[in-house]
Amino acid sequence: MHFMTALKAAWQQRNSLLCVGLDPDPAKFPEHLKGRPDAIFEFCKAIVDATADLVCCFKPQIAYFAAQRAEDQLEALIDHIHAAHPATPVILDAKRGDIGSTAEQYAVEAFERFRADAITVNPYMGRDSVDPYLAYADKGVILLCRTSNPGGSDLQFLEVDAPAGRMKLYEHVARTVAEDWNASGNCGLVVGATFPAEIARVRELTGDMPLLVPGIGAQGGDIAATLAAGRTANGTGLMINSSRAILYAGKGEDFADAARKVALDTRDAINAQR
């Protein structure tokens, strides 16, 4: 199934714009999982199974797996999501960005090895560095645009002379992706919840293009401001990510139940503003 088709179905059928980020840190795991060779898989699997009916997608961050030599557990986790929750798309948060020949290998890694439904990509090396991902027309390609970290302004907020006139660099990225790179209708953009004015500007430039919005929860982004700035006319268009606030809501053997409660509260808080 096309990533965008699956995402739109999840928005409607789950009545949810919530994306749960899977950033497993073994130091924060409950004691009963610590030291197990499969701890990362078991922790994430429990979170997934507890929250799948509340989310529009999951977003595993590859660095948290690779740093622990747990890429095999990431493969197993994505396989589990596809088998147990087949209507839930998976975004591999990798933020890849490299020359075309290397990007081809990263695309194989994301879509053929890990079998992700979408990937986050850094667009700042230009179109040829993104083409290998776009070639997978049924997969989502979610490009960094206006990121949630404070240092994002160092470059993304610079004024540039673009073909459409003078604008900020993130605006040029948004316009370029929407008008030139999205021929297969499989692109989205990353825009941080910590910058609601920029979310509104990106929405203005891109129409109904899906936006992945990190920064609520632990990073302090405001849900009401995010929805007001970024939702589409039908009340969707957003994948609002929360990671740490949900993953580490509980510290005991009932950690998955605690995660479900926070995920439910977060989904409902989002829906209250739709």
Image (spheres, grey):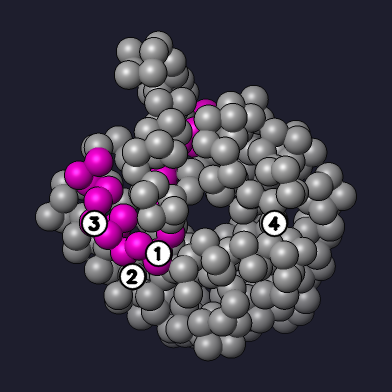
Q: Is residue 150 visible?
A: yes
Q: Which residue is mark 2?
A: 111
Numbered disc 4: secondary structure: loop
From this view, report whether residue 78 is shown above or below residue 187: below
| Rendering coords of residue 88 (x, y %) | 59, 73
N-terminal of the pair, mark 4 or mark 2, is 4
Seen as rendered, the residue at the extreme bottom is: 83
Q: Are marks 4 and 2 in contact (CB under 8 Å)?
A: no
N-terminal of the pair, mark 2 or mark 1, is 2
Instruction: Check disc 3: other Cα within 10 Å, few if <14, some if 14-19, many if 20+.
Output: some
Instruction: Check disc 2: other Cα within 10 Å, few if <14, some if 14-19, many if 20+.
Output: some
N-terminal of the pair, mark 4 or mark 1, is 4
| Rendering coords of residue 60 (x, y %) | 49, 64
**Within the image, what quadrant is residue 106 found in?**
bottom left
Mark 3 to mark 4 CA distance (whole Å): 28 Å
Instruction: Check disc 4: other Cα within 10 Å, few if <14, some if 14-19, many if 20+.
Output: many
